[in-house]
Amino acid sequence: MEIKAKAKFIRMSPRKIKLVIDLIRGKKVADALAGLPYVRKDAVMPVMKLIESAATNAEHNFKLKRENLYIKSITADGGPALKRWMPRAMGRATPIRKRSSHITVVLEEKITNQKSKSKNF
């Protein structure tokens, strides 16, 4: 079962967020949340908050165990950009684009099948 969570209109460039989400894609939720505080990027906080939210939704809404969840996919897509102008020399102006992002995370339960191996003679 897939559990999806989204964080929209995060005031940070998708390029900067992708540096963080590339580190945790495919990992277990517990491992991702344990390792993210040691990454020195501002994008860590919204990503941690989103993963925590998705894991809590899986526990509460679908009665799944947190230790069985892993990050199936996580993406950072571009949102709307605020367009501003910066004055330059001789009466000119240059555009500034203040970008935003939409982050989507998909969690899935990894079930380990523990089959006993018996030899048939």
Image (tube, grey):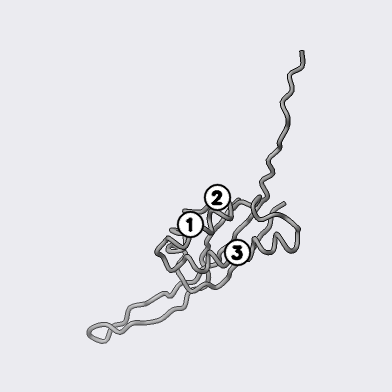
x, y percent for residue 75 = 54, 58
Sequence-wise, the earlier of marks 1 and 2 is 2
Q: In the image, which disc is placed on residue 120?
A: none
Neighbours of disc 3 within 10 Å: few (<14), some (14-19), many (20+): some
Q: Nearer the viewer, residue 22 or 89?
A: 22
Name the residue type under label 2: Lys
Q: Mark 1 or mark 3, which has the lower sequence index? A: 1
| Residue at the outermost top position | 121
Q: Earlier in the sequence, mark 2 or mark 3?
A: 2
* Mark 1, residue position: 35
| Residue matched to label 2 | 27
Q: Which residue is mark 3?
A: 52
Q: Horizontal and vertical percent for residue 39?
A: 42, 61
Determine the secondary structure under disc 2.
loop
Q: Position of residue 70 (x, y in %)?
A: 61, 51
Q: Residues within 10 Å of mark 1 (few under 14, many from 20)?
A: few
| Cβ–Cβ under 8 Å for marks 1 and 2 | yes
Q: Residue at x 63, y 66 (%)?
A: 53
Outermost residue toward the bottom in this view: 91
Q: Quadrant of the C terminus?
A: top right
Q: Quadrant of residue 66?
A: bottom right
Q: Is residue 92 left or right of residue 58?
A: left
Q: Could you tell me how far apart the alpha carbons at marks 1 and 2 are, in whole angstroms?
A: 10 Å
**Looking at the image, which residue sits at the far left?**
90
At label 2, counting other C-alpha atoms closer than 10 Å, the crowd grade (few under 14, some 14-19, many 20 or more) is some
Q: Amino acid at mark 1?
A: Gly
Image depth: mark 1 or mark 2 in front: 1
Identify the residue at horizontal 73%, vertical 19% (top origin).
Answer: 119
Q: Element type at marker 3?
A: helix
The residue nearer to you, when weighing 33 against 13, is 33
How many labels were placed on the picture?
Answer: 3
Instruction: Kindly report the distance in space between the C-alpha atoms of the residues bearing marks 2 and 3.
Output: 14 Å
